[in-house]
């Protein structure tokens, strides 16, 4: 298999190509984020392809969420360039305010600890996500207050768009309930639906499978694949659940102590000794015997055994 | 501190009488400590200066009532199951939801009652006056409700905008001789400008910090009004503020040569009630405009963004909502209605001075909003009637009026910490097709 052979070649740490050869949607160049003396993200470069799922994995404290916060403007990176290249326009995310990143560059995100508007109804949550389009339609509230202009039509369309996403995440029945009253798994799905309602070109998901049971986790995989295929947007995913990561991602970036240690297709990363070392700790012996790697591969890959394990090494 | 300590003492076993007595004793001790100086000793004027009057019997009454009250309270707490508490909460929430539903019908009914009030057989000058006062506070409450209830920005200096509105009306009307109807929007505009000016630097603060800064701003406005003598005539206040006219017809007894007043134009006998009733209807209309505006803007994207900001600002940022602009609009619109109410206040009184714009006013308006249930329009009405009308009713209690006021507040905070009617209806629904037609205004 030529693909498997290509994957075994080690990639440079600053390699910014997308392994599948897809057009890069997001390019991260030499991103560094320091908090005082602590370097949370250290000179990380990678690219995420358009209409692909890119997963960022790594042990706790590897700097994954910091990277996300830099991307979505919640932190201003110390060094580095973040370029979003969508439909021929380049946006330099490191220069933009957090709300402008969503408004202008159309980057949507979810949060590790769910951030919904708990006292508002599910439908209202999705309407808030369409705020900017609706604001324009309501003439920045002036026309809407007077009841002239096309606000009613725009609102109907917004409700239809929200209904479409409610159907995708299976929450139509609960549309008029308060978001805070939903069970945990439903809240996670609603957060994804809310981010999608803002019509992003890049969706950043911070541990979407955290706290989900296996059935919900499988549904999530299906949802993310559906989003990728149907809506042709890029997804960036932080995840600990390897069954999610290995099954759906097209490209995996591994961080450890703020540095990128591996980058490639799932099959490549799964067999990369540096990754295994990062997850299982340093051995006395620098070289891990191939048999051990082969034994550990299913662990990294989640519970599901994969026939390509042997070749991937 | 003592309450905490006593709770620990009493909380462990079922009904430990000794612990309960100890708890009540501690509370009584606190009451004694406070009572000696506050109740027990009173200054009185005696010939040749101030003297002290001792009222130890009152202290004893206070201490005994605190002891008994605390004991009964603790006993109830011990014997009552938490399940029952939760049950009561559910019942109260259902009442809140019911009132909200009923208010759709009751709103117009209330408006009709309000319109008919001056014509009722029992109504007199006093009643219409109080109703005007209550409506003023309802309007202020609705204005502040936009800032506190919807946008979740705790504003302790709302009275500043009220003052700006009152002074801008008074100064413009006195110096430039413009009519009330021209000054009213100007006063609102000035107040809104002040809202933006204040909001710009402070809206990055949140919660308690914002509250303190707005409190300071309220005081600054008052102190400036008090000390800028050349402009505001300081503590002397501004007098001779023109009264509103009925489309150019003044409500005066004496009519100048060649002009007409309200009663001559309509061929009525002069009555001072005409003006009172006109003012009453004026504030009724202003308050209804405020309500209509709020109900409508709540269903617009900006209204939903306010509520979303109250819920989670970080999530709002991630959805592309500009938090500063959104908060500023809430601040400016709330300030604008404060300004309208202020100019009404100025024209009603005919005289304003910084005395009228103390922190207590802000506190009362905020109490109306919080007691009514944040964000609830009908709750504001109920709270304003209770608070303003209630204090007027209890006028006979004299010095105990504020005590009753405070007691009522404590009771409500114990039973309904989220306000009387803390129930929120979604601004639009997916089900029941017709209801999701968004921008629908409603009365009251």
Image (spheres, grey):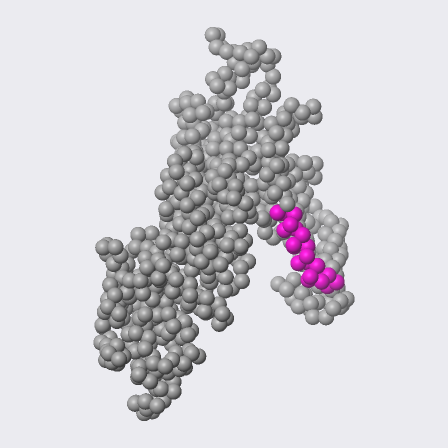
The span picked out in magenta is B77-97
Residue furthest right as drawn: B17
Left-right relation of B167 to B73? left
Which of the two residues, A117 or A213, is positioned nearer the viewer here? A213
Depth check: give the residue in front, B21 or B8. B8
Residue B224 lies in what quarter of the image?
top left
How many numbered callouts?
0
Q: Is residue B357 visible?
A: no
Q: Main secondary structure of the magenta part?
A: helix
Q: Residue furthest front?
A: A1
Please give the name of the residue rendered at 41% of the width and 81% of the height, measured from the top-left corner. Answer: A305
Quarter of the rendering occupied by the C terminus of chain B: top right
Of the 4 image quadrants, the one containing the N terminus of chain B is bottom right
Residue B134, percent from left and from top: 59, 34
Q: Does residue B147 appear in the picture of this structure?
A: yes
Task: List x then y, in percent, for residue B112.
Answer: 61, 29
Where is residue A281, by image quadrant? bottom left
Q: Quadrant of residue A261?
A: bottom left
Q: Residue at x 42, y 38 (%)?
A: A144
Q: Position of residue A90 (x, y in %)?
A: 23, 56
Q: Position of residue B85 (x, y in %)?
A: 68, 58
**Relative to residue A135, is residue A207 depicted above or below?**
below
Answer whether residue B18 is magenta in the image.
no
| Residue at the image position 35 percent from the left and 82 percent from the top | A309
**Is B94 contained in the magenta span?**
yes
Q: Relative to residue B28, is residue B178 drawn left or right?
A: left
Residue pictured at 52% horizontal, 39% vertical: B142
Q: Nearer the viewer, residue B192 or A274?
A: A274
């Amino acid at each position: 298999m030529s693909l498997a052979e290509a994957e075994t070649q080690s990639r440079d740490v600053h390699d910014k190509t997308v392994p599948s050869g897809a057009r890069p949607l997001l390019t991260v160049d030499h991103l560094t984020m320091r908090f005082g003396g602590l370097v949370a993200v250290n000179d990380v470069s990678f690219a995420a392809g358009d209409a692909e799922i890119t997963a960022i994995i790594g042990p706790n404290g590897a700097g994954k969420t910091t990277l996300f916060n830099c991307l979505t403007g919640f932190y201003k990176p110390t060094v580095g360039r973040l370029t979003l290249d969508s439909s021929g326009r380049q946006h330099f995310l490191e220069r933009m305010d957090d709300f402008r990143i969503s408004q202008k560059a159309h980057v949507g995100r979810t949060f590790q600890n769910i951030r919904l508007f708990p006292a508002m109804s599910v439908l209202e949550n999705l309407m808030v996500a369409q705020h900017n389009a609706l604001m324009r339609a309501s003439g920045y509230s002036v026309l809407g207050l007077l009841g002239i202009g096309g606000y009613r039509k725009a609102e109907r369309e917004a409700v239809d768009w929200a209904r479409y996403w409610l159907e995708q995440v299976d929450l139509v029945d609960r549309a008029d309930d308060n978001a805070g009253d939903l069970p945990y798994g439903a809240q996670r799905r609603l957060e994804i639906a809310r981010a999608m309602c803002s019509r992003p070109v890049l969706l950043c998901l911070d541990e979407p499978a955290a706290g989900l049971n296996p059935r919900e986790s499988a549904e999530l995989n299906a949802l993310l694949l559906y989003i990728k295929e149907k809506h042709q947007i890029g997804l960036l995913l932080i995840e600990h659940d390897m069954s999610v990561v290995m099954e759906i991602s097209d490209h995996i970036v591994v961080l450890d102590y703020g540095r990128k240690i591996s980058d490639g297709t799932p099959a490549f990363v799964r067999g990369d000794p540096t990754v295994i070392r990062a997850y299982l700790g340093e051995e006395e012996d620098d070289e891990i015997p191939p048999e051990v790697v082969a034994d550990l591969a299913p662990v990294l890959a989640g519970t599901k055994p994969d026939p390509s394990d042997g070749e991937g090494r | 501190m003592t309450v905490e300590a006593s709770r620990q003492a009493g909380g462990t076993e079922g009904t430990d009488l000794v612990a309960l007595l100890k708890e009540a004793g501690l509370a009584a001790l606190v009451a004694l400590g406070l009572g000696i100086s506050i109740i027990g000793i009173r200054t009185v004027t005696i010939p040749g200066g101030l003297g002290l009057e001792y009222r130890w019997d009152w202290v004893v009454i206070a201490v005994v009532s605190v002891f008994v009250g605390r004991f009964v309270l603790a006993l109830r707490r011990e014997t009552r199951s938490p399940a029952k508490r939760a049950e009561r909460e559910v019942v109260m929430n259902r009442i809140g939801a019911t009132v909200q539903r009923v208010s759709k019908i009751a709103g117009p009914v209330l408006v009709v009652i309000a319109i008919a009030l001056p014509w009722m057989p029992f109504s007199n000058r006093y009643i219409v006056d109080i109703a005007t006062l209550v409506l003023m506070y309802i309007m202020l409450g609705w204005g502040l409700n936009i800032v506190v209830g919807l946008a979740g920005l705790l504003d302790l200096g709302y009275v500043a905008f009220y003052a700006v509105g009152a002074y801008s009306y008074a100064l413009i009307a006195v110096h430039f001789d413009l009519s009330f109807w021209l000054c009213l929007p100007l006063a609102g505009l000035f107040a809104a400008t002040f809202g933006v000016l204040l909001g710009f630097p402070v809206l990055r603060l949140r919660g308690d910090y914002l509250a303190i800064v707005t409190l300071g701003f309220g005081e600054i406005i008052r102190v400036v009004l008090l000390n800028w003598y050349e402009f505001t005539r300081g503590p002397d206040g501004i007098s001779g503020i023109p009264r509103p006219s009925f489309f150019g017809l003044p409500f005066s007894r004496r009519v100048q040569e060649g002009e007409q007043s309200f009663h001559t134009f309509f061929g009525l006998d002069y009555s001072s009630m005409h003006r009172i009733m006109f003012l009453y209807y004026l504030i009724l209309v202003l308050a209804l405009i405020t309500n209509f505006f709020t109900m409508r803007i709540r269903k617009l994207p900006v209204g939903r963004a306010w509520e979303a900001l109250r819920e989670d600002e970080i999530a709002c940022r991630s959805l592309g909502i500009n938090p500063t602009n959104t908060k500023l609009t809430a601040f400016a619109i709330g300030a604008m209605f404060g300004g309208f109410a202020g100019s009404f206040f100025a024209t009603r009184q005919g005289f304003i001075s910084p005395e009228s714009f103390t922190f207590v006013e802000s506190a009362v308006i905020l109490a109306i909003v919080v007691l009514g249930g944040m964000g609830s329009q009908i709750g504001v009405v109920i709270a304003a009637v209770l608070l303003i009308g209630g204090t007027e009713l209890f006028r006979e209690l004299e010095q105990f009026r504020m005590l009753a006021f405070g007691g009522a507040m404590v009771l409500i905070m114990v039973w309904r910490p989220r306000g009387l009617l803390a129930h929120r209806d979604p601004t639009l629904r997916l089900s029941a097709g017709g209801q999701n037609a968004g921008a629908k205004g409603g009365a009251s």
